[in-house]
Amino acid sequence: MSNVSAALKIQPRVVKPSTGLRDKDRKVIAETLSDITVQTYRTLLRSQVVHWNVVGPLFRPIHELTEQHYSELFGAIDALAERIRALGFPVPTGKAAVGLDKALALGGRMTAQSMVEELMEDHEALVRLIREGAGQAEEFDDFVTHDLLADRLAFHEKAVWMLRAIVAE
């Protein structure tokens, strides 16, 4: 039992990665990934709010689509956070860092259309942010981050397309 107690008290030691990426490039990429992680978390929470609160004739398809989205986003957050750690930086924490400050402003007496439009805007914002991050990763020869972000970009562009199709007239 004393070994467990001692193990729990070990102070973390920072060991800087030496993987061929320059320190300043790793920092820029980690900061962008942190922004993407926060926005992804916010979008996950807002997708759940819509999932639970949407009403009307399109309840079932929107309910099912948002469930698919928040499930995908949950896995993405883990992959993004692990990439930040692999670059040697801490993952953002705290209420503002996970988007709680703005995430729950959605819902209430909003129409299904306005909920879907807001989710579409959230995904579009992520597309822009991810595109910027992918460009940085490519510029810095960070192929792992670039591939991760290319996958994220494909998901969010498809989400925008599907949400746009729901509200199209």
Image (cartoon, rainbow, N blue to C red):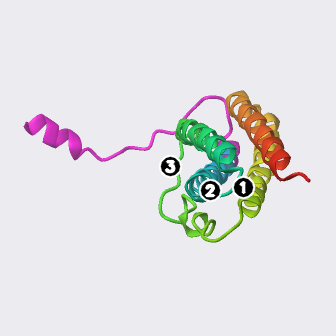
- CA gap between label 1 and label 2 equals 8 Å
Q: Quadrant of residue 64?
A: top right
Q: Amino acid at mark 3?
A: Pro
Q: Secondary structure at mark 1?
A: helix
Image position of 115 (left or right of 100): right
What residue occupies the far right of the structure in this picture?
A: 169
Residue at 55% of width from left, 60% of height from top?
97
Give the percent coordinates (x, y) of residue 153.
77, 38
Q: Magenta span covers which residues? A: 1-28
Write down the residue under mark 2: 50
Is 20 inside the magenta-drawn segment? yes
Q: Secondary structure at mark 2?
A: helix
Q: Around disc 2, counting alpha carbons within 10 Å, would you say few (fewer than 14), some (14 to 19), or many (20 or more)? A: many
Q: Comparing marks 1 and 3, which lies closer to the viewer?
A: 1
Q: Comparing marks 1 and 2, which lies closer to the viewer?
A: 2
Q: Amino acid at mark 1?
A: Leu
Q: Comparing marks 3 and 2, which lies closer to the viewer?
A: 2
What residue occupies the far front of the structure in this picture?
A: 57
- CA gap between label 1 and label 3 equals 28 Å
Residue at 56% of width from left, 69% of height from top?
101
CB-based contact (under 8 Å), mark 1 and mark 3: no
Is 130 inside the magenta-drawn segment? no
Residue at 64% of width from left, 53% of height from top?
43
Disc nearer the start of the sequence (3/2): 2
Write down the residue under mark 1: 119
Q: Secondary structure at mark 3?
A: loop
Write down the residue under mark 3: 90
Give the percent coordinates (x, y) of residue 159.
75, 42
